[in-house]
Amino acid sequence: MTSDQGRSWGTSGGYNIMRRVRRGRVVRACAAIATGGALLVGAGCVQPGEPSTRFADQVKAAQPGGPNAGVLPWFCHSEGRGEDHVPEHGEADDAYAGMVKGDLSMEDCAKAADFLDKAWATARRYPTRADAQKAGSVQAVQFEYGTGTHDVLPGVTGWQWNEPDPSKPFYLQYDGDAPESPLAGMSWYVVHVDGPPQGVAGDNDWWHRHTEICYSAVGVAIGNEISDEECAARGGVQKAWPYGWMLHAWIVPGYENHYDVFGGAFGCVRMTGPYAPPGDRCYENHSDMGHVHVPAPTAAPGPLPGGSLPGGSLPAG
């Protein structure tokens, strides 16, 4: 287990590190209380389906005079770095080389909270995969360890261009392929030619790409960043998405990634449901399972993804 890092504001405007026990203890309390059917508000413990407080309210509580004055909310701190692109530091694009994730300013934290509140207001309508499917969601990629499924948000009929719409995550990600599988995460897919798009306030939203995905059928991916020859040998068809950028958000109750809310994957998404037991090693897995680093495109912009959605093959990551 690792520890969460609450940050308190010092008189000089800097942060004093306040160590608080992270998810292991929270999960232990949640498991006991959820069994009893109660809801503990304000301690990070919730029943699956609803957060204890809105993200904006958590920022408000951290303001002077608030009950958590000076403590930066968990979703405004991330870890990871953009150098070396090695798995334990999280998959990153060349655009982030040498950068380090960390604490957001309170101003950016408030803007990030607004983004996440808008995202949750939409995603919460589909707590199970069956709910999304009944509303018209279509599978883009089957369940994968660490990322879940990629099911197109009901009502989405086209790409998002240049910047994400916080109220319309492109994908809903479920912890399993079954209809009853619970919502675990969400992600945005944005077409942007000149580097990663501007997304969430601050510098912790590191976008990633999948320039080529090998499909055996619509919604069934069998390879990521493999050669055309290998894709054909697997019986698949290669689809190129050179200017598509993706960003995940792990904010669903029971699947909050306190290490990196925008991480490319979360190790506790593994078909076992929310609230992994305390001490589970899944919390220590900070790699981006199923992702590989790809260099920035060097060719001039070519054809961008087209066609109607959600009928054709779709990108996922």
Image (tube, rainbow, N blue to C red):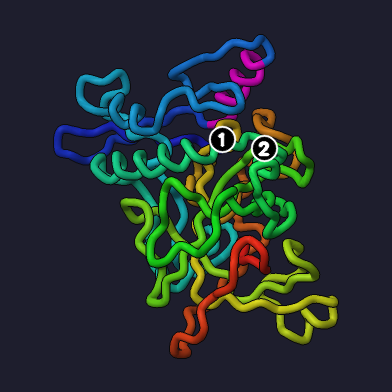
- Between 5 and 201, the one lying in front of the other is 201
- Between 305 and 43, the one lying in front of the other is 305
Residue 1 included in the magenta stretch of the image: no
Q: Earlier in the sequence, mark 1 or mark 2?
A: 1
Q: Secondary structure at mark 1?
A: loop
**Residue 23 pos. (x, y %):** 55, 31
Disc 1: which residue:
125
Going 43% across and 46% down the picture, which residue do you hit?
167
**Alpha-carbon neighbours of circle 2 within 10 Å: few (<14), some, or many (≥20)?**
some
Q: Report the predominant secondary structure element of the magenta stretch.
A: helix
Disc 2: which residue:
131
Image vertical order of residue 208 relative to residue 242, above or below: above
Going 60% across and 32% down the picture, which residue do you hit?
254
Amino acid type, mark 1: Arg
**Residue 310 pos. (x, y %):** 63, 61
Q: Relative to 68, is 74 on the left or the right?
A: right
Task: Specify the quadrant of the image occupied by residue 56.
Answer: top left
- In the image, the segment drawn in magenta is 23-34
**Alpha-carbon neighbours of circle 1 within 10 Å: few (<14), some, or many (≥20)?**
few
Distance in Å between CA atoms under marks 1 and 2: 8 Å
Q: Relative to 119, is 266 on the left or the right?
A: right
- Between 17 and 235, the one lying in front of the other is 235
Whether residue 217 is visible here, answered yes or no, is yes
Q: Secondary structure at mark 2?
A: helix
Whether residue 268 is visible here, answered yes or no, is no
User: Which numbered disc covers residue 161?
Assistant: none
**Residue 276 pos. (x, y %):** 68, 32
